[in-house]
Image (cartoon, rainbow, N blue to C red):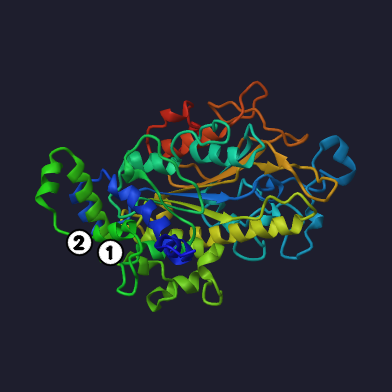
């Protein structure tokens, strides 16, 4: 059978990637609502006053290893039938993992840490994420109301319980961009994370990419060597730099031309500033990024957790984006005898996050202070894993979850909420004060999302709950 032109297109991975990413990008531009003058000003690439990072750990993390540890001297093997909690730290055979909860060393001027961490947070003998305790609030005992991966994941992305497994409402990053309308070239990037928009114009859509190579390909100016394989690809490229016609000017009176003009300006900003080069970490100009994130000796730095963290820092520091959603760790849905593997996979994500926070903390922000003074980070997973170990030596799905909030708009060096000392069930909290209260209420993901929005004085009414005011700065 004769192979068609469409067959050629589908058979080329590079072309498929370009079209998929490019179409997502242009979906956010063609419907854009940012005034053209504001887009033109974005050519200066000034970082927004507030930035947001949403960090996803994929698969359901073990919170005994991270943000809700237990002392193995108290929760011993001979008490498991009573407590239904087994920390399992003795099963971590790598000497880089502590056998007890990690309490970070006191940071100068910050006072002692009020937060303890599980062994996966980092090697206590070296710099690790727990060293930034003075920027953190840990929320424990979050009731996920589901043990299904897709439901818990989309619940935390939107702050709304899905209908079946289908997401309901906009992603929190979309809500932020929709309300704030930042004048940056690519307001929101989502790498390896879903994104939804149910009430804003296309300007609030995320540029969704599967990896850093995907991002570079999407932002690249077209080369002479690239063949135009479809009308879609040709339209994407032709949008840049063409004169406005009389017909377009006539349509402007009805708003269509304005949207087109705005999207053209946004694309032109991307092309003229060669934004793709910012993410080509192999270039000489990006030597300092390679050095800091340890990308020099990695065969595929784009695909590493450290490479993804470097992408986030670049997007924020260079004023390219306001919101970045990133999948920083995977391989956590482990049900079979894999305590060491699970801990190692978590640690890879936490080590990369430590590099990102260290970088943002050391970089001055044009608005004063450093980038962490202007950045709010939410770290989450779809649920946690059971506090007991199953018959195959692994852990299963568990309702009681934790999350980490860091940076701007959030009180620091705090732990709120709790999980029970029997089976780590979600605890009850006075939602006005944050005190543990047996007559109180559970904390749900919508409380976390409302708090993130309120931290920037945004409208959180879509969550239909009040934020956790006791952790708002």
Res 172 → quadrant: top left
- Across the whole image, how many numbered discs are drawn on residues? 2
Please say if 339 is above or below 179: below
- Residue appearing at x 49%, y 42% in the figure: 411
How busy is the neighbourhood of tag 1: few (under 14 within 10 Å), some, or many (20 plus)?
Answer: some
Please say if 428 is above or below 293: above
Q: Which residue is mark 2?
A: 241
Report x, y in % for residue 154.
Answer: 54, 40
Task: Give yes or no for contact between labels 2 and 1 (Cβ–Cβ under 8 Å).
Answer: yes
Inspect this view and state whether residue 39 appears: yes
C-alpha span from label 2 to label 1: 10 Å
- Residue appearing at x 64%, y 49% in the figure: 59
Which of the pair 46/363 is nearer the observer? 46
Which of the pair 372/312 is nearer the observer? 312
Q: Which residue is mark 1?
A: 271
Which of the pair 6/73 is nearer the observer? 6
- Residue appearing at x 31%, y 67% in the figure: 221
Label 2, secondary structure: give it: loop
Report x, y in % for residue 242.
Answer: 18, 59
Q: Is residue 123 left or right of residue 95?
A: left
Q: Quadrant of the C terminus?
A: top left
Res 431 → quadrant: top right
Which residue is outermost to the right?
A: 78
Label 1, secondary structure: give it: helix
Q: Nearer the viewer, mark 2 or mark 1?
A: 2
Q: Is residue 301 left or right of residue 402?
A: left
- Residue appearing at x 52%, y 50% in the figure: 55
Report x, y in % for residue 436.
Answer: 64, 29
Report x, y in % for residue 191.
Answer: 48, 55
How busy is the neighbourhood of tag 2: few (under 14 within 10 Å), some, or many (20 plus)?
Answer: few
Please say if 317 is above or below 85: below
Earlier in the chain: of badge 2 and badge 1, it is 2
């Amino acid at each position: 059978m004769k192979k068609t032109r469409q067959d050629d297109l589908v058979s080329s991975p590079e072309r498929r990637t370009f079209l998929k990413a490019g179409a997502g990008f242009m979906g956010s531009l063609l419907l854009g609502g940012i005034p053209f003058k504001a887009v033109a000003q974005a050519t200066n690439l000034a970082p927004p006053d507030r930035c947001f990072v949403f960090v996803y750990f994929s698969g359901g993390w073990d919170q005994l290893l991270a943000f809700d540890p237990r002392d193995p001297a108290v929760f011993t093997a001979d008490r498991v039938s009573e407590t239904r909690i087994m920390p399992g730290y003795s099963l971590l055979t790598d000497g880089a993992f502590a056998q007890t909860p990690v309490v970070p060393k006191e940071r100068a001027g910050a006072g002692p840490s009020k937060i303890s961490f599980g062994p996966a947070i980092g090697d206590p003998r070296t710099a690790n994420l727990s060293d930034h305790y003075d920027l953190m609030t840990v929320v424990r005992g979050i009731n996920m109301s589901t043990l299904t991966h897709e439901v818990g994941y989309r619940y935390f992305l939107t702050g709304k319980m899905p209908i079946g497994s289908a997401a309901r409402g906009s992603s929190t990053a979309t809500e932020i961009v929709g309300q704030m309308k930042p004048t940056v070239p690519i307001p929101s990037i989502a790498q390896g994370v879903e994104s939804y928009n149910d009430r804003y114009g296309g300007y609030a859509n995320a540029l969704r990419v599967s990896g850093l190579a995907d991002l570079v390909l999407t932002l690249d100016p077209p080369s002479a060597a690239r063949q135009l394989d479809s009308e879609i690809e040709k339209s994407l490229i032709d949008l840049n730099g063409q004169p406005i016609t009389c017909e377009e000017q006539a349509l402007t009176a009805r708003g269509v031309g304005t949207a087109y003009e705005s999207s053209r300006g946004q694309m032109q900003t991307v092309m003229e500033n060669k934004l793709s080069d910012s993410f080509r970490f192999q270039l000489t100009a990006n030597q300092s990024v390679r050095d800091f994130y340890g990308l020099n000796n990695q065969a595929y730095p784009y695909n590493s957790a450290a490479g993804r963290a470097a992408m986030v820092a670049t997007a924020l520091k260079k004023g390219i984006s306001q919101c970045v959603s990133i999948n920083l760790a995977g391989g956590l849905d482990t049900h079979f005898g894999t305590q060491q593997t699970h801990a190692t996979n978590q640690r890879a994500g936490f080590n990369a996050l430590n590099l990102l926070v260290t970088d943002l903390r050391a970089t001055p922000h044009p608005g004063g202070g450093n980038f962490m003074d202007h950045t709010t980070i939410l770290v989450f997973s779809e649920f946690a894993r059971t506090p007991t170990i199953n018959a195959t030596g692994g852990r299963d799905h568990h309702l009681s979850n934790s999350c980490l909030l860091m940076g701007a708009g959030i009180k620091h060096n705090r732990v709120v909420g709790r999980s029970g000392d029997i089976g780590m069930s979600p605890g009850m909290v006075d939602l006005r004060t944050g005190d543990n209260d047996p007559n109180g209420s559970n904390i749900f993901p919508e409380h976390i999302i409302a708090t993130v929005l309120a931290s920037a004085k945004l409208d959180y009414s879509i969550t239909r709950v009040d934020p956790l005011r006791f952790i708002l700065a």
